[in-house]
Amino acid sequence: MQIEEHKSLKDFNTFGIDCSARYFVAVTSVEELKQILSEEKFDNRFILGGGSNMLLTKDINALVIHLNLKGKKVLSETDNKATIQAMAGENWHEFVQYCIKNNFGGLENLSLIPGNVGTAPIQNIGAYGVELKDTFVSCDAIEIATGKERSFTKEDCNFGYRNSIFKNEAKGEYIITSVTFQLTKKNHTLNTGYGAIQQQLAEKSIENPSIKDISDAVIEIRQSKLPDPKKLGNSGSFFKNPVVNSKKFQEFKIQNPEAPYYEISDNEYKIPAGWLIEKAGFKGKRFNDAGVHKKQALVLVNYGNATGNDIWKLALTIQQTVKDKFDIYIEPEVNII
Protein backbone atom coordinates (compact mmCIF):
# COMPACT_ATOMS: atom_id res chain seq x y z
CA MET A 1 0.00 0.00 0.00
CA GLN A 2 1.22 3.46 -0.87
CA ILE A 3 -0.23 6.51 0.85
CA GLU A 4 -0.23 9.57 -1.40
CA GLU A 5 -0.74 13.19 -0.40
CA HIS A 6 -2.84 15.90 -2.09
CA LYS A 7 -4.19 13.41 -4.63
CA SER A 8 -6.57 14.68 -7.32
CA LEU A 9 -9.86 12.79 -7.32
CA LYS A 10 -10.91 13.94 -10.79
CA ASP A 11 -10.43 10.43 -12.22
CA PHE A 12 -12.16 8.80 -9.24
CA ASN A 13 -15.62 10.39 -9.52
CA THR A 14 -17.90 10.10 -12.53
CA PHE A 15 -18.80 13.79 -12.44
CA GLY A 16 -15.12 14.52 -13.13
CA ILE A 17 -14.96 17.12 -10.35
CA ASP A 18 -11.37 18.17 -9.64
CA CYS A 19 -11.24 18.04 -5.85
CA SER A 20 -8.31 16.57 -3.96
CA ALA A 21 -7.72 14.18 -1.07
CA ARG A 22 -5.36 15.17 1.76
CA TYR A 23 -4.25 11.53 1.86
CA PHE A 24 -5.12 8.71 -0.53
CA VAL A 25 -4.59 4.94 -0.49
CA ALA A 26 -5.94 2.11 -2.65
CA VAL A 27 -6.57 -1.24 -0.92
CA THR A 28 -6.70 -4.52 -2.84
CA SER A 29 -7.58 -6.97 -0.05
CA VAL A 30 -9.64 -7.16 3.12
CA GLU A 31 -6.42 -7.54 5.11
CA GLU A 32 -5.02 -4.31 3.65
CA LEU A 33 -8.29 -2.60 4.50
CA LYS A 34 -8.10 -3.80 8.11
CA GLN A 35 -4.48 -2.70 8.30
CA ILE A 36 -5.14 0.85 7.12
CA LEU A 37 -8.16 1.16 9.42
CA SER A 38 -5.93 0.25 12.36
CA GLU A 39 -3.59 3.19 11.64
CA GLU A 40 -4.38 5.52 14.51
CA LYS A 41 -2.86 8.62 12.88
CA PHE A 42 -5.68 8.58 10.31
CA ASP A 43 -8.72 9.09 12.50
CA ASN A 44 -10.63 10.88 9.72
CA ARG A 45 -11.38 8.57 6.78
CA PHE A 46 -13.45 8.71 3.61
CA ILE A 47 -14.40 5.52 1.75
CA LEU A 48 -14.38 5.72 -2.04
CA GLY A 49 -15.79 3.06 -4.35
CA GLY A 50 -16.61 3.69 -8.00
CA GLY A 51 -17.33 7.37 -7.37
CA SER A 52 -20.59 7.12 -9.31
CA ASN A 53 -23.08 8.25 -6.71
CA MET A 54 -21.50 11.34 -5.23
CA LEU A 55 -20.98 15.01 -5.93
CA LEU A 56 -17.77 16.48 -4.54
CA THR A 57 -18.25 20.10 -3.51
CA LYS A 58 -14.93 20.51 -1.64
CA ASP A 59 -11.52 18.95 -1.06
CA ILE A 60 -11.56 15.99 1.32
CA ASN A 61 -9.40 16.68 4.36
CA ALA A 62 -9.09 13.02 5.31
CA LEU A 63 -7.55 9.72 4.32
CA VAL A 64 -9.46 8.62 1.23
CA ILE A 65 -9.52 4.81 1.09
CA HIS A 66 -10.19 3.61 -2.45
CA LEU A 67 -11.73 0.11 -2.40
CA ASN A 68 -10.09 -1.87 -5.17
CA LEU A 69 -11.16 -5.33 -3.96
CA LYS A 70 -11.55 -7.66 -6.96
CA GLY A 71 -12.91 -11.15 -7.52
CA LYS A 72 -16.12 -13.11 -8.09
CA LYS A 73 -17.00 -16.74 -7.51
CA VAL A 74 -19.83 -19.25 -7.42
CA LEU A 75 -20.33 -20.24 -3.78
CA SER A 76 -22.91 -22.95 -4.45
CA GLU A 77 -25.37 -24.08 -7.09
CA THR A 78 -28.23 -26.45 -7.76
CA ASP A 79 -29.93 -27.36 -11.02
CA ASN A 80 -32.05 -24.22 -10.78
CA LYS A 81 -30.08 -21.62 -8.84
CA ALA A 82 -26.57 -20.32 -8.20
CA THR A 83 -25.22 -18.31 -5.28
CA ILE A 84 -22.61 -15.81 -6.52
CA GLN A 85 -20.27 -13.61 -4.52
CA ALA A 86 -18.61 -10.50 -5.95
CA MET A 87 -16.02 -8.32 -4.23
CA ALA A 88 -16.81 -4.66 -3.60
CA GLY A 89 -14.36 -3.26 -6.15
CA GLU A 90 -15.83 -5.14 -9.11
CA ASN A 91 -17.40 -2.88 -11.71
CA TRP A 92 -21.19 -3.38 -11.49
CA HIS A 93 -21.94 -3.58 -15.20
CA GLU A 94 -19.03 -5.95 -15.84
CA PHE A 95 -20.34 -8.19 -13.05
CA VAL A 96 -23.83 -8.18 -14.59
CA GLN A 97 -22.34 -9.14 -17.95
CA TYR A 98 -20.35 -11.96 -16.30
CA CYS A 99 -23.62 -13.30 -14.86
CA ILE A 100 -25.40 -13.13 -18.21
CA LYS A 101 -22.48 -14.83 -19.99
CA ASN A 102 -22.82 -17.70 -17.52
CA ASN A 103 -26.64 -17.73 -17.84
CA PHE A 104 -27.24 -16.54 -14.28
CA GLY A 105 -30.52 -14.61 -14.36
CA GLY A 106 -31.89 -11.83 -12.21
CA LEU A 107 -29.62 -8.82 -12.78
CA GLU A 108 -30.18 -8.22 -16.50
CA ASN A 109 -32.49 -5.21 -15.96
CA LEU A 110 -29.70 -3.58 -13.95
CA SER A 111 -27.26 -3.51 -16.87
CA LEU A 112 -25.12 -0.42 -17.46
CA ILE A 113 -25.75 1.13 -14.04
CA PRO A 114 -22.52 2.99 -13.17
CA GLY A 115 -20.50 2.21 -10.06
CA ASN A 116 -19.10 -0.78 -8.22
CA VAL A 117 -20.65 -3.81 -6.55
CA GLY A 118 -19.85 -2.61 -3.02
CA THR A 119 -21.95 0.53 -3.27
CA ALA A 120 -24.94 -1.19 -4.90
CA PRO A 121 -26.63 -2.27 -1.62
CA ILE A 122 -26.20 1.15 0.00
CA GLN A 123 -28.92 2.70 -2.13
CA ASN A 124 -30.57 -0.55 -3.24
CA ILE A 125 -29.94 0.26 -6.91
CA GLY A 126 -32.83 -0.36 -9.26
CA ALA A 127 -34.01 0.05 -12.84
CA TYR A 128 -36.82 -1.08 -15.13
CA GLY A 129 -38.88 -2.81 -12.44
CA VAL A 130 -36.00 -4.60 -10.68
CA GLU A 131 -34.13 -3.73 -7.49
CA LEU A 132 -30.93 -5.14 -6.02
CA LYS A 133 -32.86 -6.53 -3.05
CA ASP A 134 -34.72 -8.93 -5.38
CA THR A 135 -31.62 -11.16 -5.72
CA PHE A 136 -29.61 -10.05 -2.68
CA VAL A 137 -28.63 -12.71 -0.13
CA SER A 138 -26.10 -10.96 2.10
CA CYS A 139 -23.10 -8.69 2.19
CA ASP A 140 -19.90 -8.83 4.19
CA ALA A 141 -18.60 -5.65 5.78
CA ILE A 142 -15.92 -4.27 8.07
CA GLU A 143 -16.90 -2.12 11.03
CA ILE A 144 -14.76 0.99 10.70
CA ALA A 145 -14.43 1.67 14.43
CA THR A 146 -13.29 -1.84 15.38
CA GLY A 147 -12.06 -3.52 12.20
CA LYS A 148 -14.39 -6.46 12.94
CA GLU A 149 -16.06 -8.36 10.11
CA ARG A 150 -19.84 -8.66 9.98
CA SER A 151 -22.33 -10.21 7.57
CA PHE A 152 -25.64 -8.46 6.84
CA THR A 153 -28.68 -10.48 5.70
CA LYS A 154 -31.40 -9.01 3.49
CA GLU A 155 -33.51 -8.43 6.61
CA ASP A 156 -30.61 -6.68 8.35
CA CYS A 157 -30.25 -4.26 5.45
CA ASN A 158 -33.80 -2.90 5.77
CA PHE A 159 -34.02 -2.14 2.05
CA GLY A 160 -36.41 0.51 0.77
CA TYR A 161 -36.74 2.55 -2.42
CA ARG A 162 -33.13 3.68 -3.08
CA ASN A 163 -32.53 3.15 0.60
CA SER A 164 -30.96 0.80 3.16
CA ILE A 165 -29.56 0.65 6.67
CA PHE A 166 -26.27 1.94 5.23
CA LYS A 167 -27.90 5.29 4.41
CA ASN A 168 -29.58 5.58 7.80
CA GLU A 169 -28.74 4.12 11.22
CA ALA A 170 -25.50 2.47 10.04
CA LYS A 171 -24.38 5.34 7.80
CA GLY A 172 -20.60 5.75 7.86
CA GLU A 173 -20.10 2.83 10.24
CA TYR A 174 -19.31 -0.02 7.83
CA ILE A 175 -17.38 -0.71 4.64
CA ILE A 176 -19.00 -3.34 2.42
CA THR A 177 -16.32 -5.74 1.14
CA SER A 178 -18.40 -8.24 -0.85
CA VAL A 179 -21.99 -8.92 -1.90
CA THR A 180 -23.70 -12.30 -2.41
CA PHE A 181 -26.61 -12.89 -4.78
CA GLN A 182 -28.90 -15.81 -5.56
CA LEU A 183 -29.54 -16.03 -9.29
CA THR A 184 -31.47 -18.41 -11.52
CA LYS A 185 -29.89 -20.89 -13.95
CA LYS A 186 -33.06 -21.77 -15.85
CA ASN A 187 -36.73 -20.84 -15.90
CA HIS A 188 -35.64 -17.23 -15.43
CA THR A 189 -38.23 -14.76 -14.17
CA LEU A 190 -38.10 -12.09 -16.84
CA ASN A 191 -39.23 -8.56 -16.07
CA THR A 192 -40.34 -6.90 -19.31
CA GLY A 193 -43.13 -4.78 -17.86
CA TYR A 194 -41.60 -1.44 -18.77
CA GLY A 195 -42.84 -0.09 -22.09
CA ALA A 196 -39.38 0.89 -23.26
CA ILE A 197 -38.16 -2.70 -22.94
CA GLN A 198 -41.26 -4.06 -24.68
CA GLN A 199 -40.77 -1.58 -27.51
CA GLN A 200 -37.09 -2.43 -27.89
CA LEU A 201 -37.85 -6.17 -28.06
CA ALA A 202 -40.72 -5.62 -30.50
CA GLU A 203 -38.48 -3.62 -32.83
CA LYS A 204 -36.17 -6.63 -33.00
CA SER A 205 -39.11 -9.06 -33.36
CA ILE A 206 -38.08 -10.88 -30.18
CA GLU A 207 -41.11 -12.68 -28.72
CA ASN A 208 -39.35 -15.01 -26.27
CA PRO A 209 -36.44 -13.01 -24.93
CA SER A 210 -33.41 -14.43 -23.16
CA ILE A 211 -31.74 -12.65 -20.24
CA LYS A 212 -29.15 -11.41 -22.76
CA ASP A 213 -31.90 -9.99 -24.97
CA ILE A 214 -33.25 -8.02 -22.02
CA SER A 215 -29.78 -6.85 -21.01
CA ASP A 216 -29.08 -5.73 -24.59
CA ALA A 217 -32.40 -3.89 -24.69
CA VAL A 218 -31.67 -2.11 -21.40
CA ILE A 219 -28.18 -1.16 -22.59
CA GLU A 220 -29.56 0.31 -25.82
CA ILE A 221 -32.25 2.24 -23.93
CA ARG A 222 -29.78 3.64 -21.42
CA GLN A 223 -27.21 4.53 -24.08
CA SER A 224 -29.88 6.35 -26.08
CA LYS A 225 -30.84 8.51 -23.10
CA LEU A 226 -27.88 8.64 -20.74
CA PRO A 227 -24.45 10.15 -21.40
CA ASP A 228 -21.27 8.10 -20.96
CA PRO A 229 -19.50 9.48 -17.84
CA LYS A 230 -16.16 8.98 -19.60
CA LYS A 231 -17.26 11.52 -22.22
CA LEU A 232 -19.58 13.79 -20.23
CA GLY A 233 -19.34 13.94 -16.45
CA ASN A 234 -22.48 12.75 -14.66
CA SER A 235 -23.68 10.37 -11.97
CA GLY A 236 -26.72 8.94 -13.74
CA SER A 237 -30.03 9.84 -12.09
CA PHE A 238 -29.42 12.80 -9.81
CA PHE A 239 -32.86 12.79 -8.16
CA LYS A 240 -35.10 10.05 -6.80
CA ASN A 241 -38.56 9.60 -8.29
CA PRO A 242 -40.88 11.07 -5.66
CA VAL A 243 -43.51 8.86 -4.06
CA VAL A 244 -46.73 10.61 -2.99
CA ASN A 245 -49.86 9.49 -1.14
CA SER A 246 -53.23 9.04 -2.78
CA LYS A 247 -54.59 12.47 -1.77
CA LYS A 248 -51.55 14.31 -3.13
CA PHE A 249 -51.61 12.16 -6.27
CA GLN A 250 -55.27 12.94 -7.04
CA GLU A 251 -54.58 16.67 -6.66
CA PHE A 252 -51.55 16.35 -8.93
CA LYS A 253 -53.45 14.41 -11.63
CA ILE A 254 -56.28 16.95 -11.74
CA GLN A 255 -53.72 19.64 -12.54
CA ASN A 256 -51.55 17.39 -14.75
CA PRO A 257 -53.77 14.73 -16.38
CA GLU A 258 -51.09 13.87 -18.97
CA ALA A 259 -48.40 13.06 -16.38
CA PRO A 260 -46.99 9.50 -16.30
CA TYR A 261 -47.06 7.62 -13.00
CA TYR A 262 -46.63 4.19 -11.42
CA GLU A 263 -48.99 2.81 -8.80
CA ILE A 264 -46.98 1.28 -5.97
CA SER A 265 -49.84 0.49 -3.58
CA ASP A 266 -53.39 1.61 -2.81
CA ASN A 267 -52.02 4.76 -1.20
CA GLU A 268 -48.66 5.30 -2.93
CA TYR A 269 -47.83 6.57 -6.41
CA LYS A 270 -44.45 7.18 -8.00
CA ILE A 271 -44.11 10.18 -10.32
CA PRO A 272 -41.09 10.33 -12.67
CA ALA A 273 -38.76 13.10 -11.48
CA GLY A 274 -37.44 13.47 -15.03
CA TRP A 275 -40.92 14.45 -16.24
CA LEU A 276 -41.29 17.02 -13.45
CA ILE A 277 -37.89 18.55 -14.24
CA GLU A 278 -38.60 18.64 -17.97
CA LYS A 279 -41.99 20.31 -17.44
CA ALA A 280 -40.29 22.80 -15.12
CA GLY A 281 -38.26 23.88 -18.14
CA PHE A 282 -34.79 22.53 -17.37
CA LYS A 283 -34.27 19.75 -19.92
CA GLY A 284 -31.25 20.52 -22.08
CA LYS A 285 -30.51 23.81 -20.26
CA ARG A 286 -26.89 24.78 -19.64
CA PHE A 287 -25.55 27.19 -17.04
CA ASN A 288 -21.90 27.72 -17.92
CA ASP A 289 -20.40 24.21 -17.54
CA ALA A 290 -23.20 22.80 -15.37
CA GLY A 291 -26.30 21.57 -17.12
CA VAL A 292 -29.24 19.22 -17.54
CA HIS A 293 -28.83 16.53 -20.18
CA LYS A 294 -30.69 17.15 -23.43
CA LYS A 295 -32.09 13.61 -23.64
CA GLN A 296 -32.83 12.88 -19.97
CA ALA A 297 -33.80 15.63 -17.55
CA LEU A 298 -33.02 13.42 -14.56
CA VAL A 299 -29.30 13.63 -15.36
CA LEU A 300 -27.19 16.64 -14.38
CA VAL A 301 -23.93 16.96 -16.29
CA ASN A 302 -20.51 18.57 -16.11
CA TYR A 303 -19.58 19.98 -19.52
CA GLY A 304 -15.94 20.19 -18.51
CA ASN A 305 -14.98 22.64 -15.82
CA ALA A 306 -18.00 22.85 -13.53
CA THR A 307 -17.28 22.70 -9.83
CA GLY A 308 -19.30 20.56 -7.47
CA ASN A 309 -20.88 23.73 -6.12
CA ASP A 310 -21.93 24.74 -9.64
CA ILE A 311 -23.76 21.42 -10.03
CA TRP A 312 -25.27 21.63 -6.55
CA LYS A 313 -26.48 25.20 -7.10
CA LEU A 314 -28.27 24.02 -10.26
CA ALA A 315 -29.76 21.04 -8.39
CA LEU A 316 -31.15 23.34 -5.68
CA THR A 317 -32.67 25.64 -8.31
CA ILE A 318 -34.35 22.67 -10.00
CA GLN A 319 -35.58 21.36 -6.66
CA GLN A 320 -37.16 24.71 -5.71
CA THR A 321 -38.73 25.26 -9.14
CA VAL A 322 -40.34 21.80 -9.12
CA LYS A 323 -41.64 22.45 -5.60
CA ASP A 324 -43.10 25.80 -6.62
CA LYS A 325 -44.71 24.43 -9.78
CA PHE A 326 -46.02 21.04 -8.60
CA ASP A 327 -45.83 21.21 -4.77
CA ILE A 328 -43.70 18.06 -4.91
CA TYR A 329 -40.25 17.76 -3.32
CA ILE A 330 -37.64 15.82 -5.30
CA GLU A 331 -34.84 14.39 -3.22
CA PRO A 332 -31.27 13.92 -4.48
CA GLU A 333 -30.26 10.33 -5.06
CA VAL A 334 -26.60 11.38 -5.19
CA ASN A 335 -24.57 11.85 -2.01
CA ILE A 336 -23.48 15.47 -1.62
CA ILE A 337 -19.96 15.61 -0.13
Image (spheres, rainbow, N blue to C red):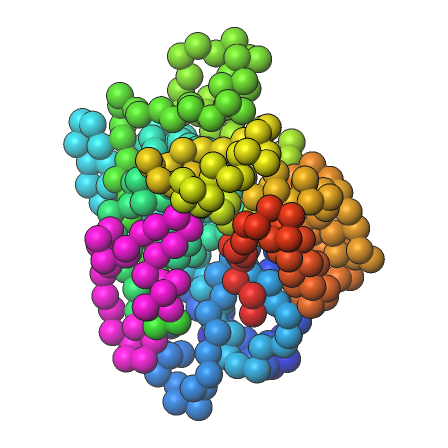
Q: Looking at the image, is 319 positioned above or below residue 251?
A: below
**151 vs 247, nearest the viewer:** 247
Question: Looking at this rendering, what residue extends furthest in the bottom direction?
Answer: 41
Residue 268: x and y in percent read 38, 41
Left or right, 241 with respect to 208, comes to right
- Write the residue at 53% across / 34% down: 253
- Write the residue at 64% across / 57% down: 320
Left or right, 148 with respect to 243, comes to left
| Magenta stretch in the rendered image | 143-171
Q: Residue 300, can we see it? A: yes
Q: How many marks?
A: 0
Report which quarter residue 23 is drawn in.
bottom right
Q: Looking at the image, is 45 positioned above or below residue 294?
A: below
Question: Looking at this rendering, what residue extends furthest in the right direction?
Answer: 288
Q: Looking at the image, is 73 positioned above or below residue 220?
A: below
Left or right, 69 with respect to 184, comes to right
Image quadrant occupied by the C terminus? bottom right
Magenta includes 69?
no
- Write the residue at 72% across / 55% down: 302
**9 vs 154, nearest the viewer:** 154
Q: Residue 73, can we see it? A: no
**186 vs 58, nearest the viewer:** 58
Residue 267: x and y in percent read 35, 40
Residue 167: x and y in percent read 39, 63
Left or right, 30 with respect to 8, comes to left
Residue 271: x and y in percent read 51, 39
Magenta includes 166?
yes
- Write the residue at 39% across / 89% down: 40
